[in-house]
Image (spheres, rainbow, N blue to C red):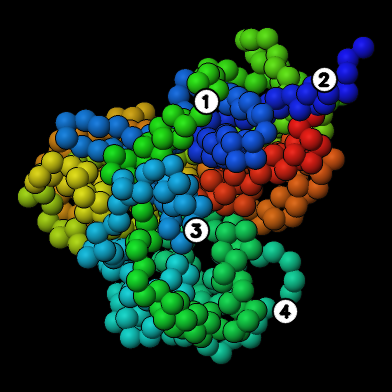
Amino acid sequence: MSSPSARGAQDRRTSRIVVVGGGIAGLAAAHRLVELGRDQACPLEVVLLEASTRLGGTIRTERADGFLLEAGADSFISEKPWALALAERIGLGPRLRRTDDRFRRTYVVRGGRLRPLPDGFLLLAPTRAWPVLASRVFSWRGKLRLGLDLALPRRRANGDESLGSFVRRRLGKEALERVAQPLVGGIYTADPDRLSLAATMPRFLALEREHRSLIIGLRRTARRETVGASGVRWSLFVTLAGGMEELVTALATRLPAGAVRLATPVAAVTPTGRGWRIDLQDAPPLEADGVVLAGPAPRMAPVIRDVDPSLAGLLEGIAYASSATIAVAYPRAAIRHPLDGFGFVVPRVERRAVLACTFSSVKYPERAPDGIALLRVFVGGAMQADLLAEDDRGLLQLAHRDVAALLGITGEPVLSRVWRHPGTMPQYDVGHLDRVAAIEARLEALPGLALAGGAYRGVGIADCVRSGEAAAERLSARLEGRGGG
């Protein structure tokens, strides 16, 4: 018979947590688990399973012929602190880079020409009158309709509202079609008439509730934020000197040797008496005390279908859109436009293939050889999914045609690349937060299981970092609470 001290040692056995999915949310979760295990001095083994042959998901950086090319996100937002804090915590502080804010301007296409977005226009609404009055983005009728926001009452109805409905109601059809749709489309690649306002732009919902008028509310809050912003270290968008994949590499190298298993798809997870069993498609099963499912929601649904069919159905109900990123580079002398901004967005009413274009070699330094302009072009999304049926050559032709016409480019690109992102952008449709609440309620009955990723409460890199770290902290706290056994 074992002694009490031996039984106590067995109770303090090493706990294992398996993270399914090696995108940024899964990497953040795995890294946070390692941190917590070290800080709490409790034995903890972390295993990260990734179905593909590489980590990082849509984050991918390539170098070619003196160019630094981003296949996916080229930056993260500093206003949401989680990605910035993580980068600094893992030693990437000296590698962080600001945007060149001399050119912090966005253009909007109107009538086939690039028009500067009025100064002080914050995503959906203006904060200053004169720049809007002087702008050629809006007609005079559209400008007058914008001003009507100052007199309109608050919405009386409760319940979620689409972003499209909200902007039409407060600011008018032209504000939606000419600014809100292309700007929000660049973030969510979504149809604004399906997009949940509460899930994507809760700030504007709060502005209407608190101040009635969006314009008045933005002016008041902008004044407070300006007063408190002295000494700001970072620009709104922050990147890494060697590209965003530096974050992926740094996180991966800080995980224990052997923790990452690539090309290891998961078939199912099922609860056991003391934890979870993870069935792999091409390898023996694993046992774990906790599981973080950090892959796209529809791909995680089959994994837990036998455990909770209702939860699986909720995950499957989160739609995803596809897109493509196209890099094109031209001699600077071949481009007539001054490129004095970060890029441009294209309203759907302009009937062009391109959603948006970033002037990468202007936005960040050392992205292209001297004398060459590097552009990142975006196509597809929920409103133009049919364009992705084109082959890579066809997509390149579409991208070149539009940017050449809009920027006054002569000649062919000296470099071009196409990256496709099928089913990678979650769509926060009206009612999304209710769905997420229902998912979280189902998880309460499944201790030891957590979800992470962009499908739930934010699609950006910073949101995914927060989601992954929060999942890790919940599971770690649960294991601590039961003494590691």
Give 389 or 407, whichever is nearer the viewer: 407
Residue at mark 4: 156
Residue at mark 1: 256
Whether residue 57 appears in this view of the structure is: no
Residue at mark 2: 6
Percent from the top left, x then y, of residue 153?
A: 63, 86
Q: CA distance from mark 1 to mark 4?
A: 54 Å
Classify 10 Å Cα crowding around label 4: few (below 14), some (14-19), many (20 and above). few
Classify 10 Å Cα crowding around label 2: few (below 14), some (14-19), many (20 and above). few
Tell me the element at label 2.
Answer: helix
What is the three-letter code of the residue carrying label 4?
A: Arg
Tell me the element at label 1.
Answer: loop
Q: CA distance from mark 1 to mark 3?
A: 28 Å
Residue under the image location 52 percent in, 25 percent down: 256
Q: Indicate which disc, 2 or 4, sits on the residue closer to the N terminus.
A: 2
Whether residue 441 appears in this view of the structure is: yes
Q: Indicate which disc, 2 or 3, sits on the residue closer to the N terminus.
A: 2
Q: Quadrant of residue 313?
A: top right
| Contact check, label 2 and label 4, Cβ < 8 Å | no
Tell me the element at label 3.
Answer: loop
Q: Report the disc number at residue 80.
A: 3
Q: Residue furthest bottom?
A: 151
Percent from the top left, x then y, of residue 485?
A: 79, 29
Percent from the top left, x then y, of residue 241?
A: 28, 44
What is the three-letter code of the residue carrying label 3?
A: Lys
